[in-house]
């Protein structure tokens, strides 16, 4: 077991007994939602995982160690604390060596989950190729990490603030299977539609688990992206969201927001300018992803 890992006893017991586990990120707590909604959502998502037969393992960095599974008190801390680092792969050595507190992004959570032996990870939406990347070269480390870390990622597709078409092209280049659950069109986070046909479609958690098992048993490194559309009653039409996204992008440009601060700024701007509608959609989709992720984890353990 890696010396940098601190595994919660519940998660450790599940690993030892081949029980299904679902990894969860912590960035959504520290950088994705306001308090107390962030902590309420984190606890609710963990409950959804448990209700569907798996053990939740929220991941974060504390005092130089990667914690796999957090207590309620630790979740409260990350929901309230200021100056918590948003940790992607490049930040991990610094944050760990300096004994800082870090909320992990998709890329960092994937890596730590894989270090612990967890094969299923649930998030809201993955990062990807940013709009204008042909000049900015802004491509999320989530994508490069997905090319080498062997986990299944359940998300509501790619965040709609990104260039979805270029992100799908990048995923194809890296050999990452992209499977949409239950529909032909690839979803775009807040919306069930994106205008892009999904490369693959499967309609049952058992089928997705079988795909994951086949990939891993063949020794093919890298992730499987499972795009799980937001529940229909919570979705926001893609055309409506595009108006807010353009306004948010213009505001970010005016304020010279760059780097890892871009996504939190855009999501907060959109939440404020949709009267919280986007926040409610975000909460609904992460809970829905947790349900599907737990179902896939249960089926995968059965196959393994």
Image: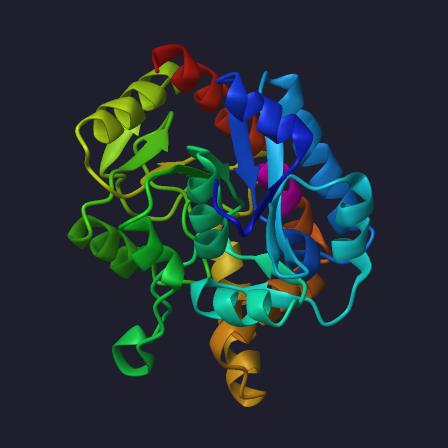
Nearest the eye: 54 or 9? 9
Q: Is residue 32 left or right of residue 206?
A: right
- Magenta stretch, residue numbers: 281-286
Nearest the eye: 195 or 178? 178
**Image point 66% across, 18% down: which residue?**
51
Q: Is residue 161 left or right of residue 99?
A: left
Where residue 269 sits in the image (x, y, percent)? 64, 68
Where residue 47 sits in the image (x, y, percent)? 70, 27
Where residue 262 sits in the image (x, y, percent)? 52, 73
Looking at the picture, the colour scheme in use is rainbow
Where residue 115 sits in the image (x, y, percent)? 44, 43
**Image point 54% across, 37% down: which residue?**
23
Nearest the eye: 199 or 151? 151
Q: Is residue 187 visible?
A: yes
**Image point 54% across, 82% down: which residue?**
257
Does residue 74 belong to the magenta stretch? Answer: no
Tell me if residue 76 comes above or below residue 200 in the rendering. Answer: below
For residue 217, which quarter of the picture?
Answer: top left
Could you tell me which quadrant the C terminus lies in?
top left
For residue 119, which quarter of the picture?
Answer: top left
**Which SS type dominates the magenta stretch?**
helix
- Specify the farthest residue to the top: 302
Q: Is residue 155 visible?
A: no
Tell me if residue 104 comes above or below residue 235 in the rendering. Answer: below
Counting every numbered tag in the picture gives 0
**Image point 34% across, 33% down: which residue?**
180
């Amino acid at each position: 077991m890696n010396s940098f890992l601190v595994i919660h006893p519940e998660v450790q017991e599940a690993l030892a007994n081949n029980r299904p586990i679902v990894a969860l990120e912590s960035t959504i707590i520290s950088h994705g939602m306001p308090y107390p909604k962030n902590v309420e959502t984190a606890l609710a998502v963990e409950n959804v995982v448990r209700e569907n037969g798996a053990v939740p393992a929220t991941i974060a960095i504390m005092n130089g160690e990667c914690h796999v599974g957090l207590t309620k008190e630790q979740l409260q801390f990350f929901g309230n604390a200021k100056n918590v680092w948003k940790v992607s792969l490049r930040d991990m050595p610094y944050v760990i060596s300096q004994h800082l507190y870090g909320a992990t992004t998709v890329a960092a959570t994937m890596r730590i989950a894989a270090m612990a032996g967890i094969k299923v990870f649930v998030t809201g939406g993955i990062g990807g190729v940013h709009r204008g990347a042909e000049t900015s070269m802004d491509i999320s480390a989530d994508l490069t990490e997905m090319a080498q870390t062997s986990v299944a990622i359940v998300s509501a597709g790619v965040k709609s603030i990104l260039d979805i078409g270029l992100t799908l092209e990048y995923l194809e280049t890296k050999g990452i299977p992209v499977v949409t659950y239950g529909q032909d069109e690839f979803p775009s986070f807040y919306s069930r539609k994106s205008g892009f046909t999904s490369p693959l479609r499967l309609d049952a958690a058992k089928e997705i688990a079988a795909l994951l098992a086949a990939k891993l048993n063949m020794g093919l490194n890298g992730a499987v992206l499972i795009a799980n559309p937001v529940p229909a009653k919570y979705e926001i039409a893609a055309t409506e969201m595009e108006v807010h996204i353009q306004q948010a992008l213009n505001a970010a440009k005016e304020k010279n927001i760059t780097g890892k601060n871009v996504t939190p700024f855009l999501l907060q701007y959109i939440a404020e300018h949709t009267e919280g509608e986007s926040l409610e959609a975000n909460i609904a989709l992460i809970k829905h992803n947790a349900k599907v992720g737990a179902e896939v984890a249960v089926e995968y353990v059965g196959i393994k």
